[in-house]
Image: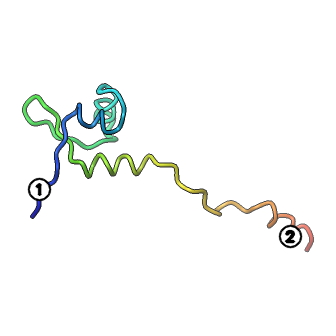
C-alpha cells in the first residue's frame, strides 16, 4: 500500500492560497479533515483536494423549468 502525502498547516495554507488561520477555522468548523499529532495538525492531501473540489462552482442543472417550457404550456 502506497503512503499518502501528509501536509502541515502552513503547506495547506500555501496550497489553497489562504491564511493559516483560515485553515484552522475550516478544521474547527469540520469542513476540512485533519489529525492532531502532538501539537501539530496533519492533513492528507486527498482530504484537502476533496475539500477544494467540494467548493468548486457546479454547472447549473436543468432542474428548474425554463421560460420556453412555460410559454409552451401557455400555448396549449
Q: In this view, does 70 lie above or below 23?
A: below
At 26% across and 44% down in the image, what residue appears? 33
Please state, as top left, top right, bottom left or bottom right, where the C terminus lies in the image: bottom right
Please state, as top left, top right, bottom left or bottom right, where the N terminus lies in the image: bottom left
Residue 63 at x, y percent in the picture: 64, 62
Residue 47 at x, y percent in the picture: 27, 49
Q: Are marks 1 and 2 in contact (CB under 8 Å)?
A: no
Closest to the observer: 15 or 29? 15
Name the element at disc 1: loop
Residue 6 at x, y percent in the picture: 16, 45
Seen from this angle, which residue lies furthest left?
A: 38
Kindly identify which residue carries mark 2. 72
Q: In this view, does 9 lie to the left or right of 56?
A: left
Q: Residues within 10 Å of mark 2 (few under 14, many from 20)?
A: few
Q: Is residue 19 above or below residue 50?
A: above
Kindly identify which residue carries mark 1. 3
Residue 55 at x, y percent in the picture: 44, 46
Residue 36 sits in which quadrant?
A: top left
Q: Say which label, 1 or 2, has the lower sequence index.
A: 1
Q: In this view, does 40 lie to the left or right of 15?
A: left
Amino acid at each position: 500500500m502506497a503512503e499518502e502525502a501528509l501536509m502541515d498547516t502552513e503547506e495547506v495554507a500555501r496550497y489553497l492560497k489562504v491564511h493559516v488561520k483560515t485553515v484552522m477555522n475550516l478544521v474547527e468548523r469540520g469542513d476540512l479533515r485533519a489529525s492532531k499529532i502532538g501539537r501539530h495538525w496533519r492533513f492528507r492531501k486527498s482530504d484537502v483536494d476533496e475539500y477544494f473540489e467540494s467548493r468548486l462552482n457546479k454547472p447549473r442543472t436543468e432542474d428548474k423549468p425554463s421560460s420556453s417550457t412555460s410559454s409552451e404550456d401557455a400555448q396549449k
